[in-house]
Amino acid sequence: MKKVKPPVAIEVSDILNLARLAMSRVDIQPLFWHFRWKNQPILGYLSSIPYWYGNLPIFAYTKLDCKLKSYIAYMSVEKEEVLLTDSNDDSRYMYGAVVETENEPPFITEALSGRNKLKDKPVLIKAGNLNSLIRMLIILSDTNSSPPLWYFEFKGKHVLGLIAPFFDYYDANALPVFFYIESDTKPPASFIRYISLKTGEEISYVPYISDMKYFYGRIVNVKSMPFFTGPDLEYRR
């Protein structure tokens, strides 16, 4: 059997951030993987993004400290909440099914072990301000979904950024560019609300989605970011 290449592993800060990442689309129910690794319960979500000469699989995960159930229930309108439940019949929530594996998936645990380093980095571009970052996010979004805004700390700075694929770049499938901003403070809430009016742009941090006339960007807190290596621009060799 051909060896399966491992994904890139990204540890998010908790189950709420994992749900915020996985349940951004209203038209697709996500699948959550559950298994034990080094005697620690792992809950994760496998996805992919266009990246250089193909697609890059990403396994976002968190370590559980509570009893697992059959579904992850999540809501973000009027309040943000995540629940572990055995039913999926409350229409206020979006649901993701949890699939337990008898053994740890070796291609995923190889990623968790840290042996699989991301060799081909994206191009790093520092945005001029938060407004510019949100405008880029709007371009990458559609009616069903939008990419996450990744938040993490790096060398004493608070970094907020997103991956933007520029398709058909020479012989590459997509040129991955990581646009980011740095700040001295942590984002005060989990969503960024934005609207452009004749009087100018309005932007603010909010704890949940409410008024639908606004565009909302969702922030996902991660413990480390393999795409980011520092403030200097890095190009693929």
Image: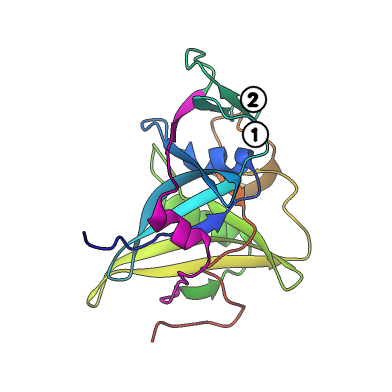
Residue 83 in the image, given as x and y percentages of width and height: 61, 26
Which one is nearer the viewer's eye here, 33 or 1? 1
Which one is nearer the viewer's eye here, 26 or 95? 95
Q: Are marks 2 and 1 in contact (CB under 8 Å)?
A: yes
Tag shown at residue 208: 1
Q: Which residues are magenta?
A: 94-122
Left or right placement of residue 192 versus residue 93 in this view: right
Residue 131 in the image, given as x and y percentages of width and height: 60, 57
Q: Secondary structure at mark 2?
A: loop
For mark 2, does the 10 Å Cα neighbourhood hold few (<14), some (14 to 19), or many (20 or more) residues? few
Residue 110 in the image, given as x and y percentages of width and height: 45, 62
Q: Amino acid at mark 2?
A: Glu
Residue under the image location 75 percent in, 56 percent down: 186
Quadrant including the C terminus: bottom left
Residue 194: tell me if it is visible.
no
- Vertical arrangement, residue 29 with respect to residue 150, above or below: above
Tag shown at residue 78: 2
